[in-house]
Amino acid sequence: MAVTLTPSAVDRVRQYLAETPGGLGLRFGVRKSGCSGWAYLIDIATDAREGEQVFEQDGVSVRVDEASLEQVDGTVIDFVRDGLNQQFVFRNPRVTAECGCGESFTTTDEAA
C-alpha cells in the first residue's frame, strides 16, 4: 500500500510546510460526499494521529488515516500549474467513475 508524490507535489508541500508552524507533512484522505460517493481531503498535518499510515518521500511525509487508505491506495498526488490556476491533482487507480463536476468519485470497491 502506498501514496506517492510527484516532484512538483513534493516541492509544493515543502513550501506549505515552511509556511506552517509545526507542520509534520501532508494529511490526505477521503470523506463520503457528493453524488459519486467520495471526496478528497488534503491539508497540512500539525499533529500525529493514532492509526495513520505514514509514507515518506524525499523528506516529505504523507499521512493517511486507516479508513481512507483502502480508497486511496496507489494514488499519485501531483501539483499542476495551468496558466494562473494551480492545484493538486490525484491519479487514483481505484477510481471507476467521477461525478460531472469532478468533486466526487466512486472506487473499484464500491463497483464490485
Image: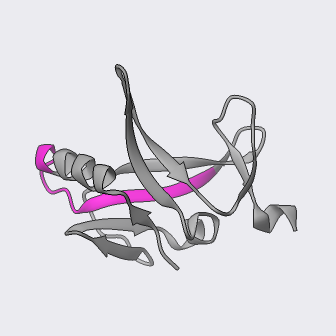
Q: At x 68% / y 28%, what residue is drawn?
A: 101
Farthest residue toward the top? 84
Q: At x 81% / y 62%, what residue is drawn?
A: 110
Using residue 81 as the reference point, say whether residue 14 is left or right of it: left
Q: Quadrant of residue 51?
A: bottom left
User: Where is residue 32 drawn, in percent x and y?
Assistant: 67, 50
Up the image or down, 13 lies above or below 87; here it is below
User: Where is residue 26 drawn, in percent x and y?
Assistant: 33, 57
Question: Residue 22 colored magenta?
Answer: yes
Image quadrant where one finds the C terminus: bottom right
Question: Residue 94 colored magenta?
Answer: no
Q: At x 22% / y 69%, what residue is drawn?
A: 58
82 or 35: which is nearer to us? 82
64 or 48: which is nearer to us? 64
Q: At x 29% / y 56%, what residue is drawn?
A: 7
**What residue range appears in magenta?**
18-31
51 or 1: which is nearer to us? 1
Farthest residue toward the right? 112
User: Where is residue 60 drawn, in percent x and y?
Assistant: 24, 65
User: Where is residue 105 drawn, in percent x and y?
Assistant: 70, 47
Using residue 92 as the reference point, say whether residue 112 is left or right of it: right
What colouring style does the render use? one colour
